[in-house]
Image: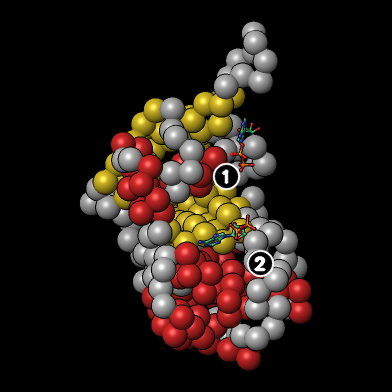
Amino acid sequence: MPHIALKDVTKEYPAPQRGHAPTVAVDRVSLEIEKGDVFGIIGYSGAGKSTLVRLINALEPATAGSIEIDGTDITRLSAARQRQMRTGIGMIFQRFNLLSSRSVRRNVEYPLEVAGMGKAERRRKALELLDFVGLADKAGAFPEQLSGGQQQRVGIARALAADPPILLADEATSALDPETTDEVLDLLAKVNRDLGVTIVVITHEMEVIARIATKVAVMDRGQVVEAGETYSVFTNP
Ligand code: ADP
Ligand code: ADP
């Protein structure tokens, strides 16, 4: 059974005005992502990548189709069960989304605090994760004191706090320079290798896919126009 399976998933947004056609942001997409994959989704702006992420996270309802995670169709679950499934998916973002008024350690603790974990335990977990991402010495710093690459590493530590089996990276390196991008991608590769986390990388940058994704789906105007092993999709005959 695939880890994540999308079958004929469509997402339409209502027409902005009467008489206009609805926007088909995701158009009959089928994808299978296996446990342990680093799976890239690449496409130009407007291709439907972010919408696809929100669907996998059940942050938006699909118009049609099914989205199975370990065999459970999340589109058919109650809102409460969808929230529960979401704790199994870590997210990192282009803008890092750290809380500026909290220290690095307390940013990493945040999801654990929300989940009701006790102080000592979540502190231990946060420090362990900061060590894993190479920022043990920055636990007491505040986000604005860190470089962009360091902030994204904090974002990765936070995303891993609840031990999710899946990590979604949505344009996670788009705000970083090429060298820092490589460092963050190498860390994601380590997360995949050492922790066995399945990683879905959404990007408009070919270099990102080439560096870490073993499989890739190419999106254009809501559709997956090509998918397979990265080397076979992107090697010119
Ligand atoms: P990408 O992430 O690849 O840039 P998006 O998923 O953001 O693509 O957008 C796909 C299409 O859906 C675009 O035409 C966009 O304008 C439209 N769209 C995205 N979100 C919304 C929304 N909340 N309401 C209406 N249209 C949307
Ligand atoms: P506020 O309470 O100020 O409205 P939140 O504390 O809910 O804001 O969230 C602030 C930022 O932290 C948001 O950008 C959000 O994306 C991020 N965030 C909130 N909760 C989590 C979480 N459980 N895991 C990861 N990021 C989160």
Q: Horizontal and vertical percent for residue 57?
A: 45, 48
Dot 2 beta carbon under 8 Å from ligand 2: yes
Amino acid type of disc 2?
Leu
Is the C-beta of the residue carrying label 1 under 8 Å from the nearest atom of ligand 1? yes
Q: Residue at x 36, y 53 (%)?
A: 85
Query: Residue 49: x, y in percent?
Result: 56, 43
Residue 104's image quarter? bottom right
Amino acid beneath label 1: Ser
Residue 88 vs 65, above or below: the answer is below
Q: Is residue 41 left or right of residue 203?
A: left
Label 1 sits on a secondary structure element that is: helix
Q: Residue at x 36, y 54 (%)?
A: 84
Q: Earlier in the sequence, mark 2 or mark 1?
A: 1
Residue under numbered circle 1: 50
Identify which residue, 23 or 107, lies in the foreground. Answer: 107
| Mark 2 residue element | loop
Q: Which mark is residue 99?
A: 2
Q: Residues within 10 Å of mark 2 (few under 14, many from 20)?
A: some
Say left or right for 176 vs 137. right
